[in-house]
Image: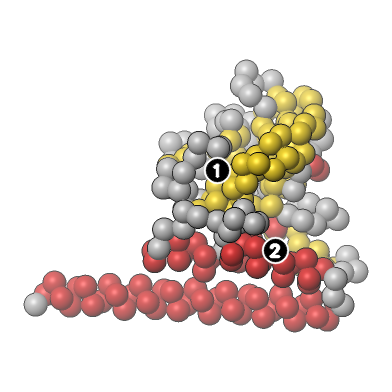
Amino acid sequence: MEDLQVGDFVKIGRGEIYEPVYAFGHRVPQRYAEFVQLHTSMEKRPLEMTGEHLVFLEGKTNPVRADSIKVGDILQGQDSNVVVQKIKFVQRNGIYNPLTSSGTILVNGFTASTYVSFQKSNNEYVELQGGIEIPISHHDLAHLAMAPFRFYCTVVAICDSNDANSGMPVYVSWAMDLVEWRKQQHITVQLFVWVSILISILASILMACTLVVTIAASLISCSKR
């Protein structure tokens, strides 16, 4: 991961599909963190990621937190699904989180999400205060929330640098701060925040699509002259 750069192509799952890394959600070479190692019967290196990172399992529609996986669970591999035989926790220096347009990436032969969840009470779906489950997964919500940033990095500019203090893009850092603030609020405020965020994201996506259509129409008009 430490050798990856923005613009490099990586596998995103089964088959031979590659996508470029458009940015890094985290890129902090000198930070120690605890990682979960998921060992399987495959003769490859174990899948290793932070506990809040999301990984795909057989029988689950959406990826779940790595620290929620148990021995006997089945990971989605590149060629076939494999059983988790042993789980270890290790300390590593360096956190790297490459982002792809699909929101997935193949790591050591296993399909993982490029996103994380800071909520442990429900490792698959978003849950509000009081145990109220929202019918959207952590992965899908993160992918939707990243849409404006993803559009900016893939269409408008190259996002090859992160904030020196946080090791994250400003957009990602802001989003994480908002999530932490939201968790401390009353359920009414949480619902209002979620609705406001979704409306803002959808409005941004609509504006981006309109801009792309307008530019395309202008280029076509110019080519006909």
Disc ID at residue 105: 1
Q: Quadrant where the C terminus lies?
A: bottom left
Quadrant housing residue 72: top right
Vertical relation: 20 (above or below) 43: below
Q: Depth-wise, is mark 1 or mark 2 nearer the camera?
A: 2
Residue 201 place in picture, x, y as percent = 57, 74
Pinpoint residue 102: horizontal percent, then vertical percent: 51, 52
Residue type marked 2: Met
Q: Quadrant of residue 71?
A: top right
Residue 109 seen in the figure: yes
Q: Which mark is residue 176?
A: 2
Please indicate whether residue 223 sits to the left or right of residue 74 in the image: left
Instruction: Where is residue 151? Give x, y as percent.
Output: 46, 65
Name the side, left or right, on which 32 lies relative to 19: right
Residue 145 percent coordinates (x, y)? 60, 66
Q: Which mark is residue 140?
A: none
Which element type, helix, strand or loop, lies under badge 2?
A: helix
From this view, report whether residue 38 is shown above or below residue 67. above
